[in-house]
Amino acid sequence: MDERRSIIRELEEKKRADTESRNRLLEGLGQALIQRMEEDGSFSEGIGGILAEYRGLQNEIADSIDTIKILEADSQRLKELDDNISAKEGETSRLTKEFAEACTRLGKALLGVGGLGGFSDYRQQEETLLAKIEEQEQKTRELEEREGGVLAWLGKNAQMAVAKALVLKNRSALQKVYRISGEQFFILKPSNALEGEAAEAALNAEDIKRRLDSLADDLSVLKADRRKLSDTFGAEGSPSKRINALQKRITLTKEEFPGLYLRLGSFAAKSEGREVLSSVLNDEDKAVLERAAFHQSIVEEKELKIKKIKASISIDNEKAEIEKIKKAIANQRHKIAAANEEISVLEKQIDEAEQNIEELKTFLDENDTGK
């Protein structure tokens, strides 16, 4: 293996290290210069493009941060709305059950109040169901008192099961009649003054209904707010997705700053750059530029050495190629000499053949019998 290639790799590595050192110095200088100019409001005409780009990136980050804050606030508001809606729906579910029970108690009390209009149909249903319940309960008592053998006992049990099932069904239907009667009270709004148990049941049911109506109004407002807030997210996705996208955007934007600082530092390293930035460059900056220039000189020195070695390698490669071609030419010439020698032999054979032909023609002419 050619040792010169190993030397080139070592030089490339040293060149890379010095280039990175130079870039870090110039990047740091560029960052310090931009921040200094931003703080004191100075503006260098020759680098207006870099400053404008820097401010554009800063504004882009600031806008993204402001948007994230708004989205986080909206997301928190959405969570609060969801929590409130869930709590009020749970309270509504609980009060709905209480209201059904209160209406059942109210309906039973109302059907016991005489002269109360609008409830005659429910009283008839109550009387019918109470009669059926009494009938089935009486039948159950009679079956329990009946005696007999095994078959009679089995038949009795079957009849008792049917009777008890009918009692439960009718009791359930009666509770429904009471509940509907209680609910009807809020529709009919009878003018009769209620007393005793009916008045107390009505007050209790009215209180629960007022709370349910209030909850319904609250839920309507909360759901409308949630719907309005959700609609603002619908077009661009959920807040979490938008926040993640903005955070990635901020990260990518920040990654552009080092290149921007390096451009300004590299500009400051040039004579024209030092002239343009003379008003903001201090002694410390000049020391940084000197160190950067030192690293740059080493880089250029390494580049020159690399070019020389590569040129030396190229010369050797070209020489080797020339030798290879010369050998090929010599080989071809040897082949040509051999071919020429062979041609000479063949031409001699042709001459001999032609001479032989002439001799044979002469013989034929001399011995021609036609003469």
Image (tube, rainbow, N blue to C red):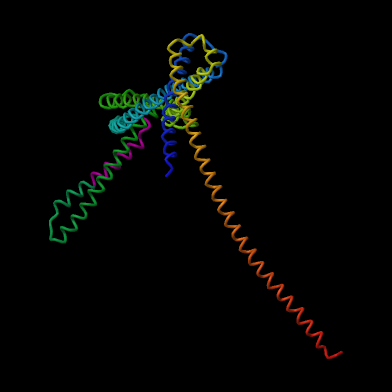
- Quadrant of the snapshot with the N terminus: top left
Q: Residue at x 32, y 28 (%)?
A: 87
Farthest residue toward the bottom?
369
Farthest residue toward the front?
366
> Residue 8 versus residue 157: which sits nearer the camera?
8
Up the image or down, 15 lies above or below 42; here it is below
Q: Toward which corner of the image does residue 220 lie, by quadrant?
A: top left
- Whether residue 294 appears in magenta in the rendering, the answer is no
Up the image or down, 307 lies above or below 328; here it is above
Q: Position of residue 230 (x, y in %)?
A: 45, 29
Q: Toward which corner of the image does residue 44 lie, by quadrant?
A: top right
> Residue 348 versus residue 187: which sits nearer the camera?
348
Q: Residue at x 57, y 51 (%)?
A: 326
Residue 224 in sight: no
Q: Residue at x 69, y 69 (%)?
A: 347
Q: Position of residue 56 (x, y in %)?
A: 52, 20
> Residue 87 versus residue 253: which sits nearer the camera?
253
Residue 24 in sight: yes
Q: Main secondary structure of the magenta part?
A: helix
Asked whether, in this view, residue 102 is left or right of residue 189, the answer is left
Asked whether, in this view, residue 195 is left or right of residue 356, the answer is left
Q: Which residues are magenta?
A: 117-135
Q: Position of residue 322 (x, y in %)?
A: 56, 47
Q: Position of residue 35 (x, y in %)?
A: 46, 14
- Quadrant of the snapshot with the C terminus: bottom right
Up the image or down, 367 lies above or below 101; here it is below
Asked whether, in this view, residue 306 is left or right of residue 91, the answer is right
Instruction: Tally the marks.
Output: 0
- Whether residue 121 appears in magenta in the rendering, the answer is yes
